[in-house]
Every structure is written in structure tokens, then in C-alpha cells.
Image (spheres, grey):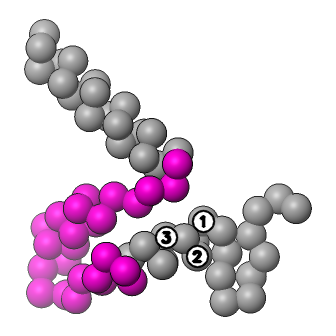
Amino acid sequence: MLGDIVKAGRYLGQSMRLMCGLPEYDTYVAHRENTHPGEPVMSYKEFFRERQEARYGGAGKRGGCC
């Protein structure tokens, strides 16, 4: 039961970070190492920039609703 509460807390924390726009770099790195071994991994700065551009638009793209 305590394990379920801890797991729920982790999911809630992850959901809150995603809603606020904070990307999960550690999750990205783990995915790249497990799924794409030997391929390059973006630095945190590159990852953060890519996620911001994907969310809000970048390189001259207009993001958002207005």
C-alpha cells in the first residue's frame, strides 16, 4: 500500500512538472541509453531548448493561440 502511494506521488510530481513545462531530462537520457545505445544524447541545454521550441514554437514559428 505504501508503495502504491509513493508511485502515485511520483506520477503526480511528473504530471505537475510537465504541466508547468519543465522537461524530464533524466527520463530522456534513460530512454536514449536503453532504446538507442551508442547514439548521441543531447546536453541538458540542447534538450531544454528543443522542448521549449516544440512547445512554444521556434525558428520563426509562432506558437500559442494568439
**Which residue is most to the right?**
66
The crowding category of the residue bearing disc 1, from other C-alpha atoms within 10 Å (few below 14, some 14 to 19, many at least 20), is few
The residue at the point 39 percent across, 83 percent down is 46
- Asked whether disc 1 touches disc 2, contact meaning CB atoms under 8 Å apart, the reply is yes
Q: Residue 15: give x, y in percent of width and height.
A: 42, 39
Q: Secondary structure at mark 3?
A: helix
Indicate the quadrant where residue 7 lies.
Answer: top left
Q: Residues within 10 Å of mark 2 (few under 14, many from 20)?
A: some
Quarter of the figure with residue 63: bottom right
Q: Amino acid at mark 1?
A: Arg
- 42 in the magenta segment: yes
The residue depicted at 78 percent of the width and 76 percent of the height is: 62
Q: Are marks 1 and 3 in contact (CB under 8 Å)?
A: yes
Name the secondary structure under disc 2.
helix
Name the quarter where the N terminus is drawn: top left
Check contact, mark 2 vs mark 3: CB within 8 A.
yes
On screen, residue 1 above or below 20: above
Position of residue 38 relative to residue 63, above or below, is below
- The kind of residue on which mark 3 rests is Arg
Residue that mark 3 sits on:
51
- Label 2: which residue? 53
Q: Amino acid at mark 2?
A: Glu
Q: Position of residue 29 (x, y in %)?
A: 22, 69
The percent position of residue 61, horizontal first and vertical second, equals: 74, 82
Residue identified by numbered label 1: 55
Q: CA distance from mark 1 to mark 2?
A: 5 Å
* Residue 31 in view: no
Residue numbers of the magenta segment: 20-46
Q: Nearer the viewer, residue 41 or 45?
A: 45
User: Which residue is found at the position 42% from the left and 46% from the top?
Assistant: 17
Which numbered circle lies on residue 47? none
The spot of residue 27 in percent (x, y) is: 25, 59
